[in-house]
Amino acid sequence: MRARAGLLETLFWRAGAVLVVVYAVPPLAWILSLSLKPAADLADKRFAPRHVTLEHYRAVFADPQFPAALWNSVGIAATATLLAVLVAMFAAYAIVRLRFRGRGLILAAALAIAMFPPVAVVGPLFDLWRTLGLYDTWPGLILPYMTFTLPLAIWILSAFFREIPWDLDKAARVDGATPMQAFRHVIVPLAAPGVFTAAILVFIFAWNDFLFALSLTSTNDARTVPASLSSETEYERWFGRELLVHDPAAVDLSRARGNGLPLLWNHNHEEPIGRVRDVRLEDGRLRGT
């Protein structure tokens, strides 16, 4: 009976994994196909390109806006991730290990902050950042990102720290280790899977942000990839950029109409960026309206 239940569970998870792959791979394959087609063939409604070209990728990296946005996204998301995970490690350890009043209140407050709608604060932040000189700077994005990355990291690491046997911490103390040494050499290595999990999720959340990146930046000094993608109007370049950084936005293939080009949908927006209604060639480039 147990063997049959184990077999059913294995089949269930494998079938679920197959469904996820079948759902996720076709849009990426379609974007790859479009990014490898010449501009004149983008509206031919064929999946496989008749002629493979790398002109779109060359055009993407020839434009100074995209490399700058890519560098900004990597640097800002990595810095926000490092700060959030580092602070969350100490906060989660204190919440789980120490006994004091208000521990549950701290976790509830962190969750409430994470659930607060960013659109409600982006306006005041815009005015405040311009006054303080943080507008269009890396710190001007890293600080808002900490408001939703830090609570997420605290909750994830708190769950991992609860599963660690505290007898190991006590044994290290008995052997003469200080609280910081016990935390660094015993607790943190055991919580490494949780730390990496939190870092990956926090990085994705910071990378995908669109609202703050669009509202609190105006130049290549701090504009990130999602904000840069939203301003791209040349669709042959958009597909190359989208394949390189496909997390901030996705292509909704089920809504394709007429000319075969998909609806451009940003997952951080409730509104579509736009639908391609007409395609024409101008100066050797594909234009959509």
Image (spheres, helix red, strand yellow):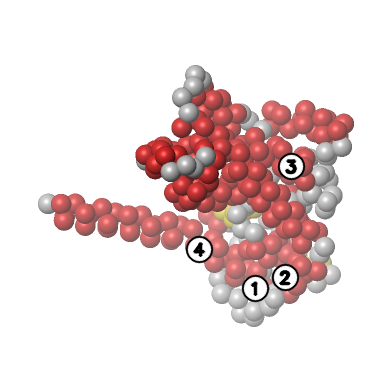
Residue at 71% of width from left, 70% of height from top? 57
Within 10 Å of disc 4 (Cα), the crowding (few <14, some 14-19, many 20+) is few
Query: Quick check: marks 1 and 2 in contact, CB under 8 Å?
Result: yes
Within 10 Å of disc 2 (Cα), the crowding (few <14, some 14-19, many 20+) is many
Tag 1 secondary structure: loop
According to the image, label 1 marks what residue? 36
Circle 1: residue type: Leu
Counting residues from the N terminus, which is met first, the one under dot 3 or under dot 2?
A: 2
In depth, the one of 274 and 66 nearer the eye is 66
Circle 2: residue type: His
Residue 199 sits above or below residue 93 on the image: below
Counting residues from the N terminus, which is met first, the one under dot 4 or under dot 1?
A: 4
Counting residues from the N terminus, which is met first, the one under dot 3 or under dot 4?
A: 4
Circle 4: residue type: Pro
Residue at 38% of width from left, 57% of height from top? 17
Query: Quick check: marks 2 and 4 in contact, CB under 8 Å?
Result: no
Residue at 60% of width from left, 64% of height from top? 31
Circle 3: residue type: Leu
Would residue 136 be found to the left or right of residue 17 on screen?
right
Task: Give the position of the C terminus as an image quadrant.
Answer: bottom right
Whole-percent x and y of residue 243?
A: 63, 63
Counting residues from the N terminus, which is met first, the one under dot 2 or under dot 4?
A: 4
Front of the two marks 3 and 2: 3
Would residue 188 be found to the left or right of residue 41 on screen?
left
Q: CA distance from mark 2 to mark 4?
A: 20 Å
Within 10 Å of disc 3 (Cα), the crowding (few <14, some 14-19, many 20+) is many
According to the image, label 4 marks what residue? 26
According to the image, label 2 marks what residue? 56
Q: Which mark is residue 226?
A: none
Tag 3 secondary structure: helix
